[in-house]
Image (cartoon, helix red, strand yellow):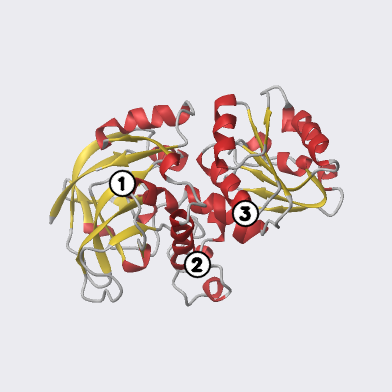
Amino acid sequence: MLKSIAAIADGKGNFSIQQIKIDDPHGDEVLVQLKAAGICHTDWDSQSWSKSLIMGHEGAGIVIKIGPQVSKLKVGDSIILNWAVPCYQCFQCKEGNEHLCEVNSAVVAGNKISGGHARLEASTLDGIPIERSFSLGTLSEYALVRESACVKIIVDIPFPSAAIISCGVMTGYGSVVNVAKVKSGSSVVVLGTGGVGLNVIQGARISGASKIIAVDINKKRLDMAKQYGATHTIVATQEDEGLLQAAEQVKGLTKRGADYAFECTAIPSLGAAPLAMIRNAGVAVQVSGIEQEIKIDMRLFEWDKVYINPLYGNARPQIDFKILQELYTNGQLLLDSLVTQTYPLDKLDQAFSDMHKGLNAKGVIVF
């Protein structure tokens, strides 16, 4: 078995850096040497999922061993890891909803840890099998995954930039292009300009939106938003309940309200805020994955407004990750500058601290 240093969550809100052991790949499994792993609020939350696990769900690296049933990858391939693995056979996969796979999707199954990935017993801590966050566990020097969790890197791209494609970039871009299908010449509002929000802005720019309005309480983040395509910015205040005052400013910029609005704050009290930003028959998208109970004034829906709560930007990993790589190559998708800070694994606590302070567009662990 291979030894690997990894970040281990205790399920009670803490983590530690420990050594695990990983088995050789069986069947269609692939052993990956991680080169970079993106970090986000989900990784922070995973410390409190009531069980020990190997943290991390965004990553890129190199294939170093393959199982006998692996058919599309070879040793030496550079890959991006994807946490939403489709089976291609279930009802949702056949409907084109690969991100909602009824067989492999950890989220749809109601379990944020297990999914249709490599064997649980393949990774051990002190001789005891340990689960992997989203069945990947990318905050580790090595990870054992299914072949279907890997997407080949087909362009010249640094590993830290490639690593962030697999969640934040895909979620933001996909929410615009795959979910809302933003039209050229339209107006877009983005609430929250963190890593996901910046990629919503990028998706809107790439889609040809003529007016992209970024809303945040952090002026520095708004300045960053302009670099990625925001044409207008609104500095919000924490006292602005439901961002109704900001919504009036949006209406002043768009006459009747925006065509599309995207919530990227992960703040439950702002779950209904995008509805206040859009015109009649406009589209509001809740991108950040709010799962708490919220109250909505139904008058915000007047009239004919559409509210969508998508997962993972309706990702089709083998298709969309390649599109994102091509957009990066032709200069339309900015990724290198999104990685504003890298850290060694033993500085993960600092990376989390910087994330909570809003210092980075995206922080990445490098191995």
Quadrant position of the N terminus in the picture = bottom left
Residue at x 40% of width, y 58% of height: 82
Kind of residue indicated by mark 1? Ala
Residue 311 in sight from this viewpoint:
no
The answer for how far apart the CA atoms under marks 2 and 3 are is: 21 Å
**Relative to residue 181, is residue 167 depicted above or below?**
above
Residue 274 in sight from this viewpoint:
yes
| Of marks 2 and 3, the one in the foreground | 3
What is the x, y in percent for residue 260? 72, 49
What is the x, y in percent for residue 334? 48, 46
Q: Residues within 10 Å of mark 3 (few under 14, many from 20)?
A: many
Q: Give the residue pinned by disc 1.
A: 36
Q: Dividing the picture into quarters, in which one does residue 6 lie?
A: top left
Q: Give the residue pinned by disc 3.
A: 176
Quadrant position of the C terminus in the picture = top left
Mark 2 / mark 3, whichever is N-terminal? 2
Task: State the count of labels.
Answer: 3
Residue at x 28% of width, y 40% of height: 7
Q: Give the residue pinned by disc 2.
A: 101
**Relative to residue 30, is residue 307 depicted above or below?**
above
**Relative to residue 142, is residue 212 depicted above or below?**
above
| Of marks 2 and 1, the one in the foreground | 1
Kind of residue indicated by mark 3? Val
Residue at x 20% of width, y 66% of height: 75
The answer for how far apart the CA atoms under marks 1 and 3 are is: 26 Å
Kind of residue indicated by mark 2? Cys
Mark 1 / mark 3, whichever is N-terminal? 1
Q: Dividing the picture into quarters, in which one does residue 8 lie?
A: top left
Say which of 273 and 206 sits in front.
206
Say which of 185 and 213 sits in front.
185
What is the x, y in percent for residue 64? 19, 61
Q: Residues within 10 Å of mark 2 (few under 14, many from 20)?
A: many
